[in-house]
Image (cartoon, grey):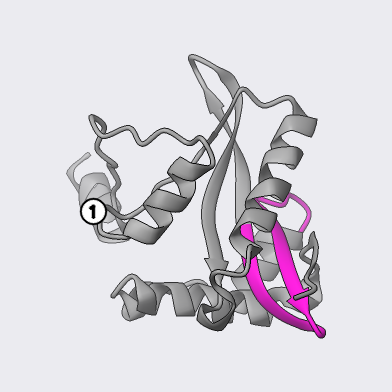
Amino acid sequence: MEFTIRFAEKRDVSAMLDLIKTLAVFEKQPEAVIVTEADLLEQGFGKQPLFTCFVAEKDEEIVAMALIYLRFSTWKGKTVHLEDLIVKEKYRGEGLGTLLLDEVIKYGYSLGVKRICWEVLDWNEPAIKFYESKGATLLKDWFLVQMDQTSIENYIEKL
């Protein structure tokens, strides 16, 4: 199959949001997505973009995406964080994940990053095997830590 990988554009936000919602369903959290098309437009294509996104097209349909952003590591320096790599189910197994990951890694390399990092759910065996096959290391002695909006608000109230 022939896919085109390119940087996402404003016109792609609807398809991007559809893919994000598809991932949330796959990860058993369909209600967790609160981001909107307006958020994606402003925060990805506004005056100070917070992310970069690669999309994969087949016959003018967006069928996959990889959303990344820059971070800074106090140990390593400039870092790329891969927030999500999403491939529509009917296109999985056709090398599309590899094509997108290749673009992310080439982009990071062009920026001179010292690390590219991301998370994967512990039950997502196909993704774990995919990432390990690419030379990625799973850091099993680290925990992902986060505070949701409610936790942040509760914290602020206690200050």
In this rendering, the answer to whether 16 lies above or below 118 is below
Residue extending furthest left? 158
Q: Position of residue 42 (x, y in %)?
A: 69, 65
Q: How crowded is mark 1: few (under 14 residues within 10 Å), some or many (20 or more)?
A: few
Residue extending furthest top? 75
Q: Which residue is drawn at 36% across and 36% down?
A: 138
State which region is magenta: 46-66
Q: In which quarter of the image is residue 14?
A: bottom right
Q: Which residue is drawn at 75% across and 39% down?
A: 106
Q: Where is residue 90 in the image (x, y as percent from the top left)?
A: 55, 83
Residue closest to the eye, 137 or 9: 137
Q: In which quarter of the image is the N terminus?
A: bottom right
Residue receiving disc 1? 151
Looking at the image, residue 56 sits to the left or right of residue 133; the answer is: right
Residue closest to the eye, 36 or 87: 87
Q: Quadrant of residue 59?
A: bottom right
Looking at the image, residue 42 sits to the left or right of residue 133; the answer is: right
